[in-house]
Image: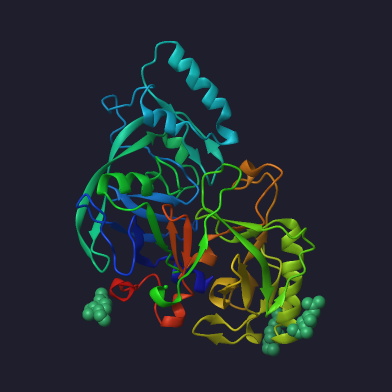
Amino acid sequence: MSQRQSFLVAVSLCLLLAASFSPCTLAGGGGKPLITPITKDASTSLYTAPLEGGRPLVLDLSGSLVRSTCVTCDASHPTLEPYERECADANRYTRPRCWAYAAGSDDGASNGRSKCAAHPYNPVAGRCASGDLTRAALSASATDGKNPLYPVSFPAVASCAPESLLDKLPAGAAGVAGLAPSDLALPAQIATTQGVARKLALCLPSGGQGITSAMEFTPLRRYQEQPGYYIWIKGINVNQNPVPLGYYGGPLVVGFSTTTPYTALRADVYRPFVQAFDNASTSGFGMQRVAPVAPFEMCYNRSTLWSTRIGYAAPQIDLIMEDGTRYGVFGANSLVQVDDGTVCLAFVEMKAGEVGYEHYGQQAPAMVMGGYQMENNLLVFDEEQQQLGLSTLLLFRQTTCSNFNFTMAA
Ligand SMILES: *[C@@H]1O[C@H](CO)[C@@H](O)[C@H](O)[C@H]1NC(C)=O
Ligand SMILES: *[C@@H]1O[C@H](CO)[C@@H](O)[C@H](O)[C@H]1NC(C)=O
Ligand SMILES: *[C@@H]1O[C@H](CO)[C@@H](O)[C@H](O)[C@H]1NC(C)=O
């Protein structure tokens, strides 16, 4: 636990919203890209940013709405009308668990209710509610791509949500900021109000850079009309050897989630992957297997591992991108210390229908990349160019997402 504690309290200046790098180009409209610090919450492993008047919102990469218990959500809050475009946008995609609520909102409209109802979803508890669509004032800092400049307050369409929808979120959180590539998620709303590109740079603190030279780009792909970011990979290597996936040969779909603490692999991918990793770590790296510690299966005696600048020395995991380039996952992102003497492979098996994957139905992606694997890597989700930029682990450059110096990115 000791290591976990030390990184969980870290704060970084790292969610670079609607910005672009090298150098930070400012699109027309005179607005500037915005930036906000991210904190990892120790007890929930969720990431928050102080976007609502200093109150934190939980970051959700696959969320398509901003929702809040809203200081503004009293009787006088300005609600949108059912016929407004934003109301249609807010209801374009409904999580399966929200269908009952969505049906209810039609009743509202037909019995003369002149408010737009949205269906905010709690991605951690897997629960839904009904709330008015309103306009909230959010805030972040303007940036020149190098440094934070000055605070900016901007209006955003947001859904109100009852207090009960804060269940399982960090103490003090006011709601959830959806970051998906959709019109009412935060990147698109900031792009509109600031006149900048629909682009999101995410650097999650652990507890990353080499950006310009080491960034690899891969196309963003659509998946089942689900909100969120997806890429295709061709395979996974462990210690330079392809993992035998017994797959039909099509692309493997990879999603990204800031509300999933550890990367989840679909069962048919998980099993050969952990076997390949275990084989390479015990026979190649001399790591000694010990009893599993939930939720992990492959755990090792910490005394049989070496520490390096990029985490424990362990078999390298490579994701093979569409163009054949490799994206490496090193010890800092693949192994997690669970107690003084034990280190575990920080990947879990996806359980069909579980919260977080239930909306995929029978066809879950091969992999949903979780927060731990993204920490100290810089990810740039570029909705306009439809591509994802991935940095190598920032630890190679002797930096992290917590002491990221934006000058280096320019
Ligand atoms: C097991 O690991 C060894 C050493 O890294 C390697 O030579 C061998 O090919 C691996 N076997 C399998 C089945 O992955
Ligand atoms: C871990 O390895 C050390 C050193 O090899 C050994 O003394 C210790 O008993 C091992 N612990 C377990 C749980 O196997
Ligand atoms: C960032 O790097 C630049 C150039 O190396 C340096 O002048 C500046 O002081 C650094 N800023 C911080 C906050 O470390």
Q: Nearer the viewer, residue 85 or 345?
A: 85
Q: Nearer the viewer, residue 14 or 12?
A: 14
Kindly identify the residue that appears in the image at 60 percent across and 65 percent down: 322
Q: Quadrant of ligand 3?
A: bottom left
Total number of numbered discs in the rendering: 0
Residue 151 lies, with reference to residue 373, above or below; the image says above
Residue 87: which quarter of the image?
top left
- Horizontally, residue 50 falls left or right of residue 344, namely left
Q: Is residue 6 above or below residue 19?
A: below
Q: Quadrant of residue 325?
A: bottom right
Q: x%, y% of residue 314?
A: 63, 81
Residue at the image point whose x is 43% and y is 33% from the top: 89
Which quadrant of the rendered structure holds the N terminus? bottom right
Q: Residue furthest right?
A: 246
The answer, for residue 346, to whether it is visible in the render is yes
Q: Nearer the viewer, residue 183 or 315?
A: 183
Colour scheme of the rendered structure: rainbow
Q: Compared with residue 293, is residue 200 higher up or lower down, i.e. above or below?
A: above
Q: Position of residue 257 (x, y in %)?
A: 53, 54
332 with respect to 233 (left or right):
left
Left or right side of 156 for 265: right
Question: What is the quadrant of the C terminus in the image?
Answer: bottom left
**Visible in this render: residue 172?**
no
State the image coordinates of residue 53 (x, y, percent, origin top left): 26, 47
Residue 269, quarter of the rendered image: bottom right
Residue 11: x percent and y percent?
36, 65
Q: Residue furthest top?
A: 111
